Amino acid sequence: MVSNDIRDDLAAAERTFEESPVTIEDGLDVDDPELVQLRRACRLLAAGSYLLERGYYTVVIESSFVAIERTIQFRLIHDGAMAPEGIISSHRRLYQRGAQAGLYNDRFGEELADLWNPTRTKTYYRLGIATEEQAEAMHRFATTFTNTSSRRAG
Amino acid sequence: MSLLGSVARGEADRASDVDLLIIVEEDKTSARRAVQSIVRDLQETKFDGNRYTFQPLVESVESARRIGERLREQFDDGITLVGSDQLTEVRKKVYADGE
């Protein structure tokens, strides 16, 4: 049973996304849509590194995946393979699109999707318990991926 | 290189994407990068005052055979822009695999 309070909070949250922005996160106040994606990736990695030191491994794993996806989106927009307003809601589809634009080969895209599936869904549903080793490895991978992709984009 | 989709069928309007199929012999990933960079330039160029969106599908001879079923439908409506003996060969194999 959902109480009225919860319903009000949901409506209030929805409104904040519909209204024009008020207090924008530092570093994201840029007009260039591709740059917004890259900045989001970098901020996610920075937050990940802060939380890794403090032992929040689950959120580090989650945010590493999101950073990788924002980086792919940045490159797709940069290379004209995706419209800035475009949405790719499936993770696997986004990784495939990266391969189709030549960011990496098909095999790498499939490996990314396969890594996302067990790792991320298990972390979500607590079938798998996040470890420091996973968080460190994922954060390192996402950082290298983002650095390499942004360098290649010039 | 083949032109596919609504543009090839003559059903396109101003907002339609231009669908292209490019089959390459060499490394597919570097070809995809090269094609994407050409597409990026094309999308920034105006043709008779209009800009168009291009959707390239780059496959290798080998991967084209693997996704043969999907390609058959595309070849049915497609128009060959740049042909080669290899492309004719791929088309033949794609159709032969479906029989």
Image: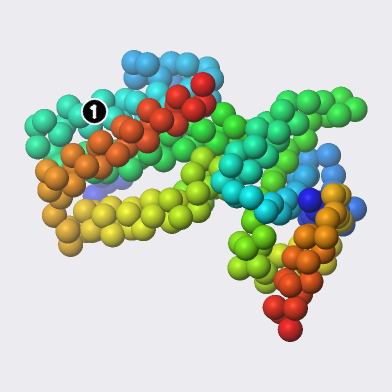
- Does residue A80 appear in this view? yes
Q: Nearer the viewer, residue A101 or A17?
A: A101
Check the residue under mark 1 and report the chain it is in. A
Q: Quadrant of the N terminus of chain A?
A: bottom left
Q: Nearer the viewer, residue B29 or A146?
A: B29
Query: What residue sits 32% from the left and 54% below the top?
Result: A115
Left or right: residue B94 compared with residue A23? right
Amino acid carrying label 1: it is Ala
Furthest residue in direction left, as rendered: A54
**Percent position of residue A125, x then y:** 22, 58
Q: Which residue is mark 1?
A: A47
Q: Position of residue A129 (x, y in %)?
A: 13, 54
Front position in the image: A8 or A49: A49
B84 displayed left or right of A41: right
Tell me: residue A58, above or below residue A118: above
Which quadrant of the figure has residue B9? bottom right
In this rendering, position of residue B90 left or right of residue A85: right
Q: Residue placed at 67% from the left, 39% from the top? A: B35
Q: To which quarter of the image does residue A117 belong?
A: bottom left
